[in-house]
Amino acid sequence: MGLGTLIGQYARLLVTEGTGPFHKGVKIACRVTGLTGLDAPAILARLLAGFPTRVLEEQPLRFQCRCSRERVDAAIVAMGRAELIDVLAHERRAEVVCEFCGARYVVEEPELRALVPGS
């Protein structure tokens, strides 16, 4: 079961079983369309209705994936020696696509050989 599914089930449980002010906020959060167009303090005010809130600091929101060639190399090494040798024998290169940002990394045969543990 993925984390998203687990969180979804937990939220569904909170919505169906809870009756307090926090549960009310969760119910509102589950109706995401009601939150579009609002700024962060307004969203917090709706989600935490009935709870005192205070904005301590504001930062601009931005998406920044942390994928890198170094992380790709580490993931390839984590496949293990046997799997890496199999990839070299059959495909002679590896292609990795980041599932978050879609960046594509191609690792050619010489680079793959350098990553084989114990070579």
Image: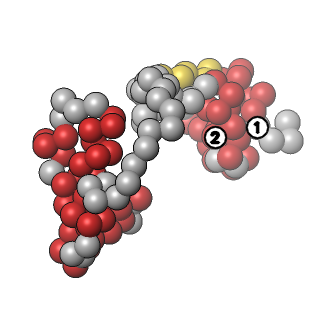
Element type at mark 2: helix
From this view, report whether residue 30 is shown above or below residue 116: below
Q: Nearer the viewer, residue 109 or 21?
A: 21
x and y percentages locating residue 25 in the rendered image = 25, 58
Q: Residue furthest right?
A: 118
Name the residue that disc number 2 marks: 75
Q: Nearer the viewer, residue 1 or 96?
A: 1
- What residue do we see at 68% from left, 46% from top? 78
Q: Nearer the viewer, residue 102 or 105?
A: 102
Q: Which mark is residue 116?
A: 1
Q: Nearer the viewer, residue 30 or 50?
A: 50
Element type at mark 1: loop
- The answer to whether residue 105 is left or right of residue 116 is left
From this view, report whether residue 42 is shown above or below residue 1: above
User: Can residue 85 be seen at all in this image of the molecule?
Assistant: no
**How is colour applied across the structure in the image?**
secondary structure
Identified by mark 2, the residue type is: Ala
From this view, report whether residue 33 is shown above or below residue 93: below
- What residue do we see at 64% from left, 38% from top? 76
Crowding at mark 1 (Cα within 10 Å: few <14, some 14-19, many 20+): some
